[in-house]
């Protein structure tokens, strides 16, 4: 409450603060700006400490899900509309988020014995109907947030299990490796979300690596958009080419690595390289991706030697270590090595 | 530092909305404001907005974390790509005038 007491605009909603910033005199504008900044930090702190859902813990194998409706505002988390064990609400976004978080939880529990994001059974929080026609989903360090999409380019972001899992995975990566969200470590961070996002979808569908389509976010693109998804892990750079979206800029090999200041140093661009390394590894091994390639990648993520500023080659070297440690013989080790070599990462 | 006092007529400013679960070139819609094409009043408003953005900025390696969107503002005091100043403003903190500048360009007098 300190922030509120100390600031004359502490109880004013953000849209009014924006109005003051736009139309107020210098003093009004300064106060409003300070309040917006303080308010964001304050909300983040208080949500962590007071959210009643956060104190509870799920038993191993049992998720603890809470879904909120942001009511097309950008206030989080919104109104709680479904919690663990409750019946479907009839609101597609609410029920899809609930189901997708459940499917993601099951994957991590059944394949890796992991109990939720924190591995301590912490609650999985998701807010739907965020913003107006909001074209995004994200992890804010505390919960997952899903927009409805605009209907012309993107459908609701709860429609794609791989994207829901991608966002949840950001929470796991943050806790396990804390990879800096810039340049190569940031691209690794993004790739890890794609790798596990795609595995969750394959596991849920019971697909082998040969049966899977290796695209991310196929279900998000609205009819009429020329694309197969947000990204292709098998052929980075081929996911879409549409006047409304532009052309997929992802490289699939180090020789095409994109040096840029955009996109946090190309985190969603250069992630195509480690994405394809995983794809090549999984395809070489065959069967189910999570049984061998997935185990190697997961062990690497948990490895304390993985620095938060790790580059592709650092991550690759650790995958080789874990391939040799986890599996007898050379088959997995060689597949991992060839996967990285196939994208120009020398190991 | 106040941009109102430090940016001259040769300055240019680029604003793009970045971040999100995918980088899609057409959705970033970078907009460039050339001060030579702006009136004094428009320049003042843009500078005020930049002064405000200075208070709301966050480090570049935190702005987009977890697929969160942000505005990337590149200020070119001399009008060229050398000696640029870059500000990252998280979308959740972005004031409406910044969003409007990105969407529509400088407000007409």
Image (cartoon, helix red, strand yellow):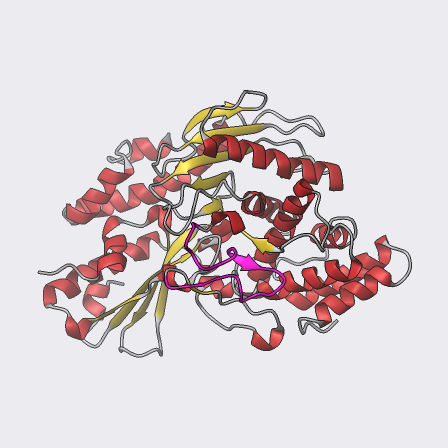
Observer-nearest of A97 and B14: A97
Outermost residue, left direction?
B109
Image coordinates of residue B26 in percent, x first then y, are 37, 63
Can residue A310 be seen here? Answer: no
Please tell me in which quadrant of the rendered image residue A224 appears.
bottom left
Image coordinates of residue B95 in percent, x first then y, are 27, 49
Outermost residue, front direction?
A224
Image coordinates of residue B45 in percent, x first then y, are 17, 59
Q: Main secondary structure of the magenta part?
A: loop
Left or right: B105, with A67 as reference point: left
Instruction: Please give the name of the residue rendered at 34% of the width and 77% of the height, measured from the top-left corner.
Output: B81
Instruction: Verify whether residue A236 appears in magenta.
Output: yes
Q: Quadrant of the C terminus of chain A?
A: bottom right
Q: Quadrant of the N terminus of chain A?
A: top left
Image coordinates of residue A148 in percent, x first then y, are 40, 41
Q: Can you say whether A65 is above or below A183 in the image?
A: above
């Amino acid at each position: 409450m300190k922030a509120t007491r100390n600031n004359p605009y502490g109880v004013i909603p953000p849209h009014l603060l924006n109005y003051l910033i736009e139309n107020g005199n210098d003093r009004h504008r300064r106060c409003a700006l300070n309040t917006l900044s303080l308010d964001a930090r304050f909300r983040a702190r208080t949500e962590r400490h007071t959210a009643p859902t956060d104190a509870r813990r799920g038993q191993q194998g049992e998720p603890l899900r809470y879904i909120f409706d942001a009511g097309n505002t950008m206030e989080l988390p919104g109104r709680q509309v479904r919690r663990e064990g409750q019946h479907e609400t009839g609101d597609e976004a609410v029920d899809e988020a609930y189901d997708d978080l459940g499917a993601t939880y099951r994957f991590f529990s059944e394949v890796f014995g992991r109990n939720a994001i924190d591995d301590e059974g912490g609650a999985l929080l998701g807010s739907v109907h965020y913003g107006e026609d909001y074209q995004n989903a994200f992890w804010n360090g505390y919960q997952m947030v899903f927009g409805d999409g605009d209907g012309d380019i993107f459908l609701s972001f709860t429609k794609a299990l791989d994207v829901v899992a991608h966002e949840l995975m950001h929470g796991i990566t943050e806790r396990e490796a804390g990879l800096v969200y810039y340049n190569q470590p940031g691209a690794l961070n993004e790739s890890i979300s794609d790798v596990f996002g795609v595995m969750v979808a394959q596991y849920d569908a019971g697909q082998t690596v040969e049966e899977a389509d290796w695209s991310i976010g196929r279900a998000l693109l609205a009819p009429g958009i020329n694309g197969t998804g947000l990204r292709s892990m098998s052929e980075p750079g081929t996911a879409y080419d549409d006047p409304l979206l532009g052309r997929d800029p992802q490289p699939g090999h180090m020789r095409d690595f994109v040096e840029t200041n955009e996109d946090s140093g190309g985190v969603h661009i250069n992630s195509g390289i480690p994405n394809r390394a995983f794809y090549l590894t999984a395809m070489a091994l065959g069967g189910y991706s999570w049984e061998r390639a997935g185990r190697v990648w997961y062990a690497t993520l948990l490895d304390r030697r993985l620095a938060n500023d790790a580059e592709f080659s650092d991550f690759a070297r650790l995958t080789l270590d874990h391939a040799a440690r986890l599996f007898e013989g050379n088959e997995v080790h060689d597949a991992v090595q060839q996967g990285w070599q196939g994208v120009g990462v020398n190991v | 530092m106040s941009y109102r006092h430090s940016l001259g007529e040769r300055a240019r400013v680029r604003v793009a909305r970045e971040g999100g679960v995918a980088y899609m070139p057409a959705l970033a819609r970078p907009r460039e404001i050339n001060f030579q094409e702006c009136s004094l009043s428009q320049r003042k408003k843009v500078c005020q907005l930049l002064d405000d953005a200075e208070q709301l900025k966050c480090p570049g390696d935190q702005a987009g974390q977890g697929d969160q969107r942000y505005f990337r503002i590149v200020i070119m005091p001399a009008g060229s790509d050398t000696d640029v100043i870059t500000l990252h403003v998280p979308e959740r903190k972005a004031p409406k005038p910044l969003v409007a500048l990105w969407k529509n360009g400088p407000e007409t007098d």
